[in-house]
Amino acid sequence: MVNKMHYVIIGNSASAVGCIEGIRSVDTEGKITVISDENHHVYGRPLISYMLMGKLKKEMIWYRPYSFYSDNKVDTLFGKKVIGVDAVQKEVRVDDGTTIKYDKLLIATGSMPFVPPFTGLEDVHSKYSFMTLDDALNLEKVLDKDKKVLIMGAGLIGLKCAEGILSRVKSVTVVDLADRILPSILDNEGSEIVKNYLERKGIKFYLSDTAEKFTADAASLKSGVKIPFDILVLAVGVRPNTELARTAGATIERGVLTDISNRTSVDDVYAAGDCAVSHDISSGTNRVIAIMPNAYIGGHNAGVNMAGGNETFKNAIPMNSIGFFGLHIITVGSYEGDTYIERTAKTYKKIFYKDNRMKGYIIIGDVARSGIYTSLVRNEIPLDTIDFDLICKQPQLMAFAAKDRDKLLNSGWKSGMIEHE
Ligand SMILES: Cc1cc2nc3c(=O)[nH]c(=O)nc-3n(C[C@H](O)[C@H](O)[C@H](O)COP(=O)(O)OP(=O)(O)OC[C@H]3O[C@@H](n4cnc5c(N)ncnc54)[C@H](O)[C@@H]3O)c2cc1C
């Protein structure tokens, strides 16, 4: 009798789900064990702010149905932390004292909040992160119409938190060292548009500023402004969770280094998602692309290869699809080269192109059919094969050559996952 493979997955989020589905597309019998220090069914992390807003109940943020693990014959160890990986013995050590042997291992440990050493932070009792469902549930317990909230960080996580709690507290103030909000995904003009919109909703910003000192209930900013608060949310940044991969002996370059099969430098150890580095084809650089689609696709890719299949993930690109109080924003790729800019009362659009390829884009407002642009970036479609002028003004399939049009229609351009020969 052939021994069944044992696949062990550390982490239980988008990459883990991708991995389970990838493994099961090849191997229906192998044993799969998922270990996570979060004691919850798998949930969509981006949805925790909607839960706070009251738009979604907790049961509605699950990323897969309750039967997901039993349907896929997966053993779960939730509420347990892996504290070490021995890649020679091929086993992981769990904080309950047990060790678990693996044949193939996926490290999908995501990222963790990064908190700079702010003076006086230890005196603040009511302070929170906003990364996990437990963070959101803990924050929810203290929300109150009389409370003033200070959020450190005007990135995606800080602003999602601001959106989630604004209607439930007295005030929300956001402070960031950068001179604009969402600095890693928006240019100056786009950032100003979104900031003005959020200010009209009631959020107050202090940019190019930071906390010099905290007391229990106030922050003194570098600019001299003093901001009293009842609740402090720290959303300054995140770091890839690479410690376990390091203990396994894997090469780390900001995140865990992987190849196009999501293999690390250590035999039978794979990594995917926010803890890992991907090759961003839009900028030609290796970087951590901390978004759901990348985590899922990378996890799926790893799963297929762990199970002996053959899949590659060669066209990773950063892409964010976010909404704040009904304002839609899509950003994709890298911002280099020449630009096409369009400003209307409802929409700001900026397209970046270079060397006969679309490199990236920003759209704020009407994001309909922007999947066509995503497909152009992800598939590096030569711009001289399409009517680029027409596409810039109006993303439409008619601007593509007939053979590409058929391909786009038949293979789901919305995900931007089209192969282009
Ligand atoms: C508030 C918020 C809003 C977001 N909004 C968006 C959005 O709009 N669009 C988008 O694309 N992305 C968004 N993201 C990012 C997205 O959620 C991540 O890219 C995605 O969840 C990454 O998935 P992952 O599988 O790599 O890891 P994660 O989701 O980070 O999960 C990793 C898991 O591993 C567990 N773990 C870590 N170490 C151990 C250990 N030693 N032992 C056991 N378990 C361990 C962690 O507890 C965690 O449960 C958002 C993130 C946040 C926090």
Image (tube, grey):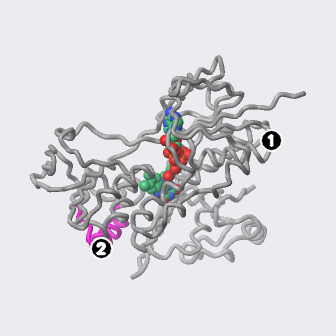
Residue type beneath disc 1: Asp
Residue occupying the point 72% across, 46% down: 22
Query: Seen in the image, is 253 located left or right of residue 71?
Result: left
Q: In which quarter of the image is residue 273?
A: top right
| Image quarter (top left, top right, bottom left or bottom right) of the C terminus | bottom right
| Image quarter (top left, top right, bottom left or bottom right) of the N terminus | top right
Crowdedness of circle 1 by 10 Å Cα count: few (<14), some, many (20+)?
Answer: some
Residue occupying the point 54% across, 33% down: 256
Query: Seen in the image, is 123 located left or right of residue 201?
Result: left
Residue occupying the point 57% across, 77% down: 394
Residue 15 at what x, y percent from top left? Answer: 60, 46
Residue 216 at what x, y percent from top left? Answer: 15, 46
**Disc 1 vs disc 2: Cβ atoms closer than 8 Å?**
no
Query: Seen in the image, is 416 located left or right of residue 131?
Result: right
Residue 27 image label: 1
The residue indicated by pointer 2 is 201
Asked whether the viewer can see residue 335, the reply is: no
> Is 203 drawn above or below residue 92 in the view shown?
below
Residue 338 image label: none
Residue 7 at what x, y percent from top left? Answer: 70, 34
